[in-house]
């Protein structure tokens, strides 16, 4: 198995991976069956992302998903994840009002889901909140660059950290590290800037649309495995065509039901 060499992946293994140059693999997961498969495949980190709002609940943005919904999905994932580190997104509206609100939301995730960490979007501005959650004993993965919860403020899904704004991105990365985050997701960042951030940090960087110079990679599983048959971001590579396979299989099932060939004797009592 490639990736982190551990029976159960812990945040401390992320620091070891950085020191050894071991690349970390991460996928999103929102249900028990995919979590079990990705865990068995050796994916190091399963992210119960608020992208569930898009790929599970069919919403245009991630803004509508609630903490209760995230907790329900996260429970399903932790049941199946025997090895992978499970990280759960704090959704929009569950941490911005105050540091107290953030600690209470993160505590609910840890108490009710059996996950190992939370993820929170934002850089310099959210660093004090990260510090409070970490001080409460809860590991935090930060998320900078394009942060989907701020898509209306950022003007859509656009690359962040280009040109002069690279300095802001580096400041954000250093701030979340200083605040105690054990890892940081870099989303839609120029590859050279992501590589520079990765070299500057002692914590792991996990890229999505951030080139090959980060310490790890994450993708939304429905994009990576081709369940999503719609438009996909340029940074996605498809490792399977599950959507096409499912379509063909569902058509066969419908045909066999209509023709009366399913169920047969073998499927009957
Ligand atoms: O919610 C999510 O899936 C994410 C990834 C895109 C990193 O935050």
Image: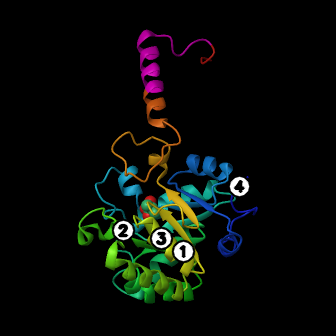
Can you tell me which quadrant of the image ligand 1 is in?
Answer: bottom left
Q: Quadrant of the C terminus?
A: top right
- In front here: 206 or 254? 206
Residue receiving disc 2 = 146
Q: CA distance from mark 3 to mark 1?
A: 6 Å
Q: CA distance from mark 3 to mark 2?
A: 12 Å
Q: CA distance from mark 2 to mark 1?
A: 16 Å
Note whether residue 70 is visible: no
- Find residue 2 and name its label: 4
* Numbered label tally: 4
SS at circle 2: loop
Residue receiving disc 1 = 198
- Find residue 33 and name its label: none
- In front here: 85 or 158? 158
Q: Which residues are magenta?
A: 248-265
Q: Foreground mark, 2 or 1?
A: 1
- In the displayed structure, 2 sits above or below 22; it is above
Label 3 with label 1: CB-CB less than 8 Å: yes
Q: Earlier in the sequence, mark 2 or mark 1?
A: 2
Rendered residue at 56%/56% (across/down):
77
Residue receiving disc 3 = 194
């Amino acid at each position: 198995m490639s990736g982190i060499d551990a029976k159960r992946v812990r945040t401390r293994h992320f620091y070891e991976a950085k020191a050894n140059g071991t690349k970390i693999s991460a996928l999103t997961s929102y249900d028990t069956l995919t979590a079990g498969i990705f865990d068995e495949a050796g994916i190091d980190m399963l992210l119960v992302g608020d992208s569930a709002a898009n790929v599970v609940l069919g919403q245009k943005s991630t803004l509508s998903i609630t903490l209760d919904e995230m907790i329900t999905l996260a429970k399903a994932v932790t049941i199946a994840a025997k090895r992978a580190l499970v990280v759960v997104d704090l959704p929009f509206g569950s941490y911005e009002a105050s540091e107290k609100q953030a600690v209470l939301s993160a505590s609910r995730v840890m108490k009710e889901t059996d996950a190992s960490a939370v993820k929170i979007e934002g850089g310099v501005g959210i660093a004090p909140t990260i510090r409070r959650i970490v001080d409460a004993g809860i590991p935090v993965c930060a998320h900078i660059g394009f942060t989907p919860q701020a898509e209306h403020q950022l003007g859509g899904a656009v690359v962040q950290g280009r040109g002069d704004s690279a300095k802001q991105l580096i400041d954000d990365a250093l701030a979340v590290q200083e605040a105690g985050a054990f890892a940081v997701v870099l989303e839609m960042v120029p590859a050279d800037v992501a590589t520079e951030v990765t070299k500057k940090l002692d914590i792991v960087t996990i890229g999505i649309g951030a080139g090959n110079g980060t310490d790890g990679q994450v993708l939304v599983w429905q994009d990576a495995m081709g369940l999503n048959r719609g438009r996909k971001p340029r940074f996605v590579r498809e490792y399977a065509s599950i959507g096409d396979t499912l379509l063909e299989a569902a058509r066969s099932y419908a045909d066999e039901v209509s023709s009366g060939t399913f169920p047969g004797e073998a499927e009957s009592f």
